[in-house]
Image: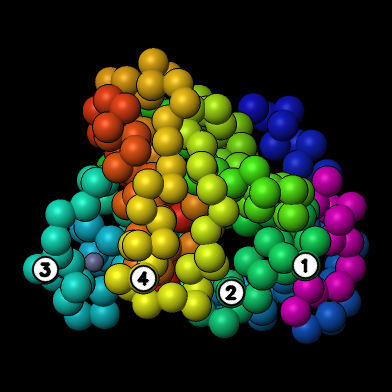
Amino acid sequence: MNFFKKIIDIGLHILFPVKCHFCLRDQPSDYVHPLCPQCLKKLKPVNVPYCLFCGRSLDRGGDFCGSCIHRSSRSFDFLRSAYMFNPEIRELIHDFKYRGFKKLGLWLGQRMAEKFSSYREFANYDILIPVPLSVSRMKERRYNQSLILASVISRYSGLELNQTALVKNRKTAPQAFLGKKEREKNLKGAFSVLHPEEVKNRKVILIDDVATTMSTLNEAASALKKAGAYHIACYTLARE
Ligand SMILES: [Zn+2]
Ligand SMILES: [Zn+2]
């Protein structure tokens, strides 16, 4: 684990040697982050208190956010995230996902791994499963952003990573352009578990980049539950 961390630190140093990814200001030669200290402050980590179900930061305290007090049933136990969604984290995720800045994912994965260890509610979970892409989406994008994030968290936490049990059966329309009901319809039956024995009676953490309406996580969790997973929680880089 330490060896891997060292390799990542060296890698990050080579990848982000001088300029801030956002403002392009020069940074000291030993600076290891892609963003300068000022731009780093624009990212908003989730802090206590947060909604005990969906993980959103709560401005006014309490246990649940307005939409979770009367929530309908979900296929997973709870969701946690490293950051609240804002224009800056959105920009980083887009660069990582769509604009070929694949290595940004290692740094984002590190941030997730650090925050992960502060969520004590994950203590009894034992396996990480990234939300998969369909075969055709994988061909277009060439890598699964959730798998990269999950791999880093696995190396840091020591939790098992499984990328074979859960699959996405078909390509679905991008969720960003759909309303809540349409998102749910779009994803109905989109995931299956190919190897139920790999998740049966396990406590699974689903990993994804962004949670908005939680439809994707809910549908993936539902497939895992049907396959016999005992408990399912979710962890994302950002919470919208
Ligand atoms: Zn900057
Ligand atoms: Zn909530």
Identify the amino acid type marked 2: Arg
Q: Nearer the viewer, mark 2 or mark 1?
A: 1
List the residue tagged with mark 3: 69
Identify the amino acid type marked 3: Ile
The span shown in magenta is: 11-22
Between 223 and 39, the one lying in front of the other is 223
Q: Secondary structure at mark 1?
A: loop
Identify the residue at image location x=58%, y=74%: 90
List the residue tagged with mark 2: 90
Identify the residue at image location x=66%, y=80%: 38
Determine contact: label 3, label 1, CB under 8 Å.
Answer: no
- Mark 1 to mark 4: distance in Å? 27 Å
Which one is earlier in the sequence, the residue at label 4 or at label 3? 3
List the residue tagged with mark 1: 99
Q: Secondary structure at mark 2?
A: helix
Residue 148 spot, x, y in % from top left: 65, 44
Give neighbour class at mark 1: few <14, some 14-19, many 20+ (Cα, 10 Å).
few
Give neighbour class at mark 2: few <14, some 14-19, many 20+ (Cα, 10 Å).
some
Which one is earlier in the sequence, the residue at label 1 or at label 4? 1
Determine contact: label 2, label 1, CB under 8 Å.
Answer: no
Does the residue tagged 1 have its C-beta within 8 Å of any atom of ligand 1?
Answer: no
List the residue tagged with mark 4: 182
